[in-house]
Image (spheres, helix red, strand yellow):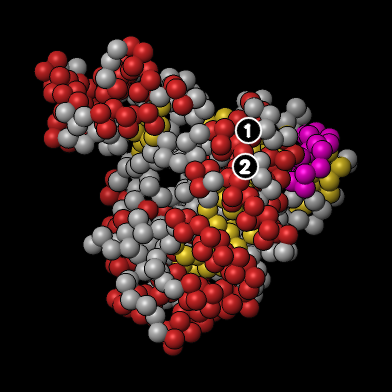
Amino acid sequence: MGHDLVIRGGTLVDGTGSAPVQADVAIDGDTIVEVGKVDGKGREEIRADGLNVAPGFVDLHTHLDAQIGWDPQVTSVSWHGVTTALLGNCGVTFAPCKASDREFLAGMMETVEDIPKNAILHGLPWNWESYGGYLDALEALGPSINIAGLVGHCAVRFYVMGERAVEEPATDDEVRQIAELAGQSVREGAVGFSTNRLPGHRLPDGRSIPGTFAHRDELRAVAKEVGAAGGIMQTVSDFRDFDAELDLIRDEARTARGALFSTAAEIGVERMDERVKAMRAEGLNVTSVTVPRSGGGVGGLSTNNFFRTDGWNELRKLDLAGRLKAIRDPETRRRLVDEVKAQGDEAAEGMKRWFYMGDQARPCYTQSLDQSLYHQAKALGEHPVETWLRISDQTDGKALFHLRGFNVDLKALEGLIRTEWAMPGLGDAGAHVSQMIDSGWSTFILSHWHRDSGVYSLEEAVRRISSVPAGVLGLKDRGTVEVGKRADVNVFDISRLEERMPEIVHDFPFGAPRFIQRAAGYKATVCNGTVVLRDDELTGERAGQVLRSSA
């Protein structure tokens, strides 16, 4: 009897870190049943001659909590080999939620993650109160890939404390209730708890989101309950108080199943490495994620992410054709330039972090620091805004510019991602949708950090984006291509794998804009035994599962 699906003739990179080998992979239902030489013909076959076969990739940092309501195919990550995405990061989630608090949580998600509030309120069913009910609602949506979720500090704290949750300390009794509700949410299926400690994450009224200034003892209490239920702690730390924040992460890891945190090269690779190595030497499960290229915004004439003066704000009111006509009018162009020049040296200096992404199908993310718009302009005797306008004009408004916000220096970033504890991720899929797009991080790891630069071997690159993050989430049945594991598998051509240039589309509810980014080089992505992507295009199959905690 033949198998349901056979991936035949590929070079297997199994996710364990072992060297690639030639092997067929046979799948029955949602399970890998044979790896090696597979006899007999499958009901469906994928020819993988000259291609690599690897596990599905696991994205540890997304904000697809809202988008999944109207885009169950969860683009753009599903174009980049991701078969499992973790929702609920940074403390912002939609559950638990009383009916009276829906608008508060939606407004918070809008200001923190740039997801339109109206889209959130009208694009989700909002038929839950508990976290388990929220997961039931996601399951009913039928996502194309697997979804796991963290329960957020903001929602839990607001559920217990109401308006006092924003700025006031919790009483001892409220700390107990917050911790118990967090633990209960893990028992209902959350894989852990997330919290934010960055004051810059704000509510619509400008106040920092609930939990930002919570006493560390509150988080220690939460970690104890979450750990008792088998969950992890995810922390977005304010590293201005470096040692205290690392002490908190250590304490969370001691009582929870593990600690996951976000980092960047600017925080200091050496001192971070010293602290995290000490935790891991203690036997603690501590892992970090960082975006594997310079993280930041994308702007251009086709977006609303550009200069802010009266003249430029008038430009925002026009469509692309109107904007092109305006910048080609000498008088208007002169005004636009003069208004930016009037802002002084600070405006020009700021463009040391802006980089033209090129005119090829593949965007350029790897320019040296002296290739910025500022340096290009200086070499040509222009002001950087003149360079920006000239390139935009020459490309009929299609030019995009990358603003490096963190991990600015790629050499420092290389030092960070070479450590054993810093994993690539932090693509923020589903968030900041009209300002940035880093959802292609997994493709970038394979194309740049493996193929183009050789920093990672292929087996190490695959391990870091499959079995390691699967292990962080406690997914014992995913992350490697082995007999008995769930059939989440990628087939790709490493020689041509790459991201495509980001583009703005208006497919959110009410026509709100967002960036998307496609990929090239993926022959197939299989999720739970079903082909969900073939030759870089989604098939429309929605085979994903909601992956609940073992509790």
* For residue 169, above or below residue 518: below
Relative depth, front residue between 335 and 521: 335
Q: Residue at x 44, y 86 (%)?
A: 172
The quarter of the picture where the C terminus appears is bottom right
Judge depth for marks 2 and 1 and give the one in front: 2
Please, what secondary structure does the residue beneath circle 2 have? helix
| Residue 5 shown in magenta | yes
On the image, the x and y values in percent for residue 130 come to 46, 76
On the image, the x and y values in percent for residue 78 come to 54, 45
Q: Residue at x 59, y 77 (%)?
A: 224
Q: Which residues are magenta?
A: 2-22
Q: Are marks 2 and 1 in contact (CB under 8 Å)?
A: yes
On the image, the x and y values in percent for residue 351 come to 34, 29
On the image, the x and y values in percent for residue 384 come to 29, 22
Picture quadrant of residue 276: bottom right
Q: Is residue 532 visible?
A: no
Left or right: residue 496 compared with residue 105: right
User: Residue 231: which disc?
Assistant: none
Quote the CA–CA distance across marks 2 and 1. Answer: 10 Å
Label 1 Cα crowd, 10 Å radius (few <14 / some 14-19 / many 20+): many
Q: Residue at x 51, y 82 (%)?
A: 180
The single residue placed furthest to the top in the displayed view is 380
Q: Is residue 223 visible?
A: yes
Give the mark nearer the N terminus: 2 vs 1.
2
Left or right: residue 287 compared with residue 346: right
- The type of residue carrying mark 1 is Trp
User: Residue 449: which disc?
Assistant: 1
Please, what secondary structure does the residue beneath circle 1 have? helix
Picture quadrant of residue 53: top right
* For residue 258, above or below residue 349: below
Q: Which residue is mark 2?
A: 417
Relative depth, front residue between 80 and 399: 399
